Amino acid sequence: MVEIINKNKVYSWGLGKPGALGLGITINVITPKAINLIDNITSISTGLHTSVMLSESGIVYVTGCNKSGRIGLGKDVV
């Protein structure tokens, strides 16, 4: 689960495998933890093992499973 509290506070919690929470860890997180971003986030979309965040400046942040290039980083980037 990823939620915008306000434009500069994004929190994440839930199943951490495989890095879908954007917290830099792969363990499960029960209580909401802040994601450290340098940009204001305007929208979020989440999937089974991924999270996608769009910033005010148009930057797209993607976290999660990159198996076979699923999150657009190339198939060999984990």
Image: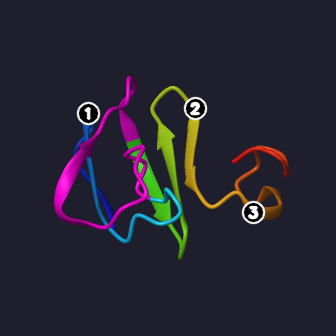
Q: Is residue 26 magenta?
A: yes
Give the class, few, some or many, for how many residues have Cα within 10 Å of label 1's Cα (few <14, many ≥20).
some
Q: Quadrant of residue 41?
A: top left
Query: What residue is shown at x 48% (from left), y 59% (from top)?
Result: 20
Tell me the quarter of the picture where residue 26 sits.
bottom left
Looking at the rendered image, the quarter that the N terminus falls into is bottom left
Q: Are the residues flagged by discs 3 and 1 in contact, CB closer than 8 Å?
A: no
Q: Residue 6, position in %: x, y? A: 20, 43
Q: Which residues are magenta?
A: 21-41
* Mark 2 → mark 1, Cα distance in angstroms: 14 Å
The residue that label 1 is drawn on is 8
Image disc number at residue 59: 2
Q: How many marks?
A: 3
| Residue 44 in picture, x, y percent from top left | 44, 56
Q: Nearer the viewer, residue 70 or 45?
A: 70
Spatial CA distance of label 3 from label 2 is 22 Å
Q: Is residue 35 left or right of residue 73?
A: left
Residue at image location 18% in from the left, 58% down from the top: 32
* First of labels 3, 1 by sequence position: 1
67 is higher (above) or lower (below) than 43: below
Q: Which of the two discs, 3 and 2, labels the residue nearer the N terminus?
A: 2
Structural distance between the alpha carbons of marks 3 and 1? 29 Å
SS of the residue under disc 3: helix
Q: Residue furthest left?
A: 31
62 lies left or right of 41: right
Image coordinates for residue 54, horizontal then vertical, percent: 51, 43
Image depth: mark 3 or mark 1 in front: 3
Toward the viewer: 56 or 21? 21
Image point 70% across, 57% down: which residue?
Answer: 66
Q: Amino acid at mark 3?
A: Lys
